[in-house]
Image: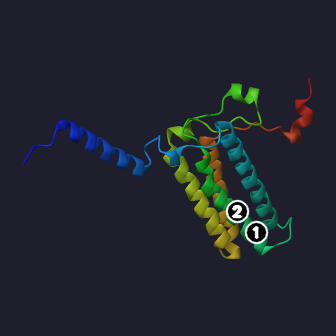
Amino acid sequence: MRPIAPFVVVVLSTAIAGVFAARSGEDATDASRQALTSQTEATVARRLLMVSIGANNDTVHDILDGVLPMDEYELRTRLTSISHMLYAFPNLYRAEPNPWTEEGAEADPARVSLATVAVWNDFQQFKTAAEDAYRLAQQAADAPREEILPLVERLETLCESCHARYRTELKFLDYDNLEDSLQP
């Protein structure tokens, strides 16, 4: 039996490692991992998705609080939509970080990323938080009517904790004290 030449061993081991890396999704040159959207487009998509989640959540609360008439189908459909959006959300982050910066906010406030570097520093924990919220929103959509409000409140707590860790603090105009803030 003739020994295998070192060159053949190197070529075979490199090929096998490449196959395993591609299958595990770790090969950054794999065409299936290349984004077709720019960083800015991904940022805008994330912001729009969050606005949609918030708008659906407002309607869910308006229904549960009696501001809008009780419509079981509308309530459950909006909760299911929130669930689906939460599932999709972490997939809108590109591999290259683009966290919020003061310069970015000044240059283009409508398109600046609101994400903190914590998203990229611990992406798996971020993704797990989004998946937990996705499951809770779907659980609320499927729950008996009397269990929906407590589940929605738990969901909001999850969302707030995620925002506290992974989103830059948003500064809002305090309309209740607007007159006081305009005084010299």
Q: Residue lying at the far left in this picture: please name it.
A: 1
N-terminal-most mark, 2 or 1: 1
Kind of residue at disc 1:
Leu
Q: Which residue is mark 2?
A: 81
**Where does the image place residue 35, in percent across and percent down from the top left?**
58, 43
Quick check: 20 above or below 179?
below
Q: What number is the disc on residue 141?
A: none
Q: Which residue is mark 1?
A: 75
Label 1 environment density (alpha carbons within 10 Å; few <14, some 14–19, many ≥20): many
Q: Nearer the viewer, mark 2 or mark 1?
A: 2
Residue 107 lies in quadrant: top right
Q: Residue lying at the far front in this picture: please name it.
A: 2
**Where does the image place residue 49, in percent across and percent down from the top left?**
71, 51
Q: Nearer the viewer, residue 64 or 176?
A: 64
**Where does the image place residue 68, in percent across and percent down from the top left?**
86, 66
Kind of residue at disc 2:
Ser
- CA distance separating discs 2 and 1: 10 Å
Residue 15 lies in quadrant: top left
Element on which disc 2 rests: helix
Element on which disc 1 rests: helix
Q: What residue is rendered at 51% in x and 45% in y?
A: 31
Q: Nearer the viewer, residue 148 or 109?
A: 109
Label 2 environment density (alpha carbons within 10 Å; few <14, some 14–19, many ≥20): some
Q: Residue lying at the far top in this picture: please name it.
A: 184
Q: What residue is rendered at 63% in x and 51% in y?
A: 89
